[in-house]
Image: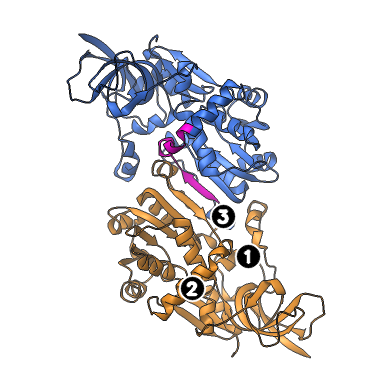
Chain colours: A orange, B blue
């Protein structure tokens, strides 16, 4: 049996801020049968994730940037790899049966043909399926591992989170509050600031677009200094955080969205501050910390069941909405985890 | 009994590169007797240390830089605090007797009046006294703690050291070699490069002044990437190291001498590299790691007794030589630990 499979790709490599016109939906014919021994699985996608970091795979890499292509660049016409979940259509691996629910790395497509190791079976555990791409997926894992494993928070410590209404930032702030920390977030609109304070329980929050001097802003929100900075944005905010860090402060660098679309934009934090204040700045990927996965999941499921943590989702409908959903991330359109629903379960 | 005590101070706070004319020798009258209960000790200095980081205490601090004044700024006319060693002249603390050899924080002076907690008794253990300011003092401790504790080296890992002929860099490289690492250093003259390769046993070394593109230079010396960078210089070399780091690379930021005398000079390493390559950048002070002190000392004394480690010292004579010794550090005049001999033992 064959189907026409629609998928999103780029027309050319992207430079600067992405636009919807950079993308197109292509169609291909896919045989819904598998070669035995191929180790392939065909997944009919239900939800796919839309994340800022994906821009870094859609650029063309100059020689000086090759190091960044470690999660391999994606070329025009190719499928765009993405976290997602769906149902097994056919599998060469006897561990997976037709209609099994699976999650892992698929593509922005109706159907994705992936290797067996790219996905695992998914038990929804009574939660909405979409949660397994956000709070119970890589976003949650990044928030949990970055905050607890890299930053080793102690009760009462002062935590700053940027992109605090984003998929990861919104969870970091809530984990930090549940851990007994004092938490301030920044975001890009007054509506988001209100949401952080009123719905997510942040101790304070500010709209960075209303601040002209981030160093002074952070000084105001942290008169006693910052112990932990969970960085999702990079550039000037990272510099300002370093200037306001306390001794033995820890910075988890999860993302630098303000730098993704501007190659010349960089943070130049004071290394003298880094030395004298013994600051640790550390980059990480959620996938490095899978040893924490069961702890992360049981803790987070408990919080969800006891309604101690709020889920911010921003779900759009249909494969064709992926380009605008993606492009909007860089304008800060999203509140919480941006997910695209590809099909009904 | 009173003596005239000569000491070095600054005429005004220093901006930019220090010059000998920034300093002057002043004289004061010191009573060589102690008020009981004052907790004071008077030390007749034998050797004092001259280190680049001291410039950071001699600047005037604008509000934006206040955080740096944590080891408190020093004002014109005041004594300049420095590691040193000498003999007790008088002590209010019964633990110290006249003529005891002590080391710790004194001042650039013939006599220093310090609190009892600032110094400890020194057992030379058969080594030249000067060793206890360099290889067996804070320089050695910084090299040992920064390399072993922050960087957690594994045998065979690739290590890059900047200011590799400096008091700390020369020891880091030798510790790394003794640990089974591959070590490349950079320094500022062909003579230093030869010394690193021929005397200190570095696997390779280069003169950074002959390189126009540090990224390409490091690519050439580390075609397989850098696992550990021990940073003594900051700025462009730190950026280049980040660009050439391997996954899970570690950077110990010990000093940023190229930034000390130019406030506008900063490293702007790619944070995208930091994330994707999961790089850790960490500042430290030797004094934070005194828990390692006995391990450091026994290991290093063994290396010295078995002639497995070389000592580079650069000793000048007399209090009046301190300003030129200090100023020369920023021109890279020194080879190894710069020490000034104040008096005979």
From this viewpoint, is residue B268 visible? no
Callout in the foreground (1, 2): 2
Q: CA distance from mark 3 to mark 1?
A: 17 Å
Q: Position of residue A49 (x, y in %)?
A: 56, 76
Return the residue at label 2. Answer: A298
Disc 3, SS: loop
Q: Which residues are magenta?
A: B277-294
Disc 2, SS: helix
Q: Residues within 10 Å of mark 1 (few under 14, many from 20)?
A: many
Q: Quadrant where the N terminus of chain B lies?
A: top left
Please name whichever residue, A300 or A258, is drawn nearer the observer in this view of the structure: A300
Q: CA distance from mark 1 to mark 2?
A: 32 Å
Callout in the foreground (3, 2): 2
Return the residue at label 1. Answer: A57
Q: Are marks 3 and 2 in contact (CB under 8 Å)?
A: no
Among the 4 quarters of the image, the one containing residue B293: top left
Question: What label does residue B278 carry, if any?
Answer: 3
């Amino acid at each position: 049996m064959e189907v026409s499979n629609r998928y999103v790709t780029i027309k050319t490599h992207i430079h600067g801020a992405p636009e919807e016109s950079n993308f197109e939906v292509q169609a291909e014919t896919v045989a819904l049968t598998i070669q035995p021994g191929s180790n392939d699985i065909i997944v009919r996608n239900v939800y796919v994730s839309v994340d800022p970091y994906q821009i870094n795979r859609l650029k063309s890499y100059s020689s000086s940037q090759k190091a960044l292509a470690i999660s391999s660049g994606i070329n025009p016409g190719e499928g765009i790899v993405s976290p997602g979940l769906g149902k097994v259509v056919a599998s060469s691996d006897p561990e997976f049966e037709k209609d099994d629910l699976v999650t892992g790395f698929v593509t922005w497509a109706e159907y994705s043909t992936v290797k067996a190791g790219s996905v695992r079976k998914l038990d929804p555990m009574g939660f909405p399926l979409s949660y397994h791409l956000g709070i119970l997926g890589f976003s949650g894992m990044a928030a949990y591992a970055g905050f607890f494993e890299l930053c080793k928070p102690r009760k009462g410590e002062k935590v700053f989170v940027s992109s605090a209404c984003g998929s990861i930032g919104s969870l970091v702030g809530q984990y930090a509050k549940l851990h007994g920390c004092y938490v301030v977030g920044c975001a890009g609109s007054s509506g988001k600031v209100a949401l952080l304070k009123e719905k997510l329980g942040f101790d304070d929050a500010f709209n960075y677009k209303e601040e002209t001097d981030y160093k002074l802003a952070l000084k105001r929100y942290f008169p006693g200094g910052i112990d932990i900075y969970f960085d999702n944005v990079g550039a000037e905010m990272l510099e300002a955080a370093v200037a306001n860090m306390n001794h033995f402060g820890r910075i988890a660098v999860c993302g630098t969205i303000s730098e993704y679309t501007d190659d010349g934009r960089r943070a130049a934090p004071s290394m003298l501050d880094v030395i004298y204040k013994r600051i640790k700045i550390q980059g990480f990927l959620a996938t490095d910390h899978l040893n924490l996965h069961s702890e992360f999941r049981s803790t987070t499921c408990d919080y969800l069941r006891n309604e101690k943590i709020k889920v911010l989702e921003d779900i759009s409908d249909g494969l064709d909405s992926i380009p605008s959903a993606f492009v909007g991330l860089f304008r800060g359109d999203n509140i919480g985890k941006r997910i695209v629903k590809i099909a009904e379960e």
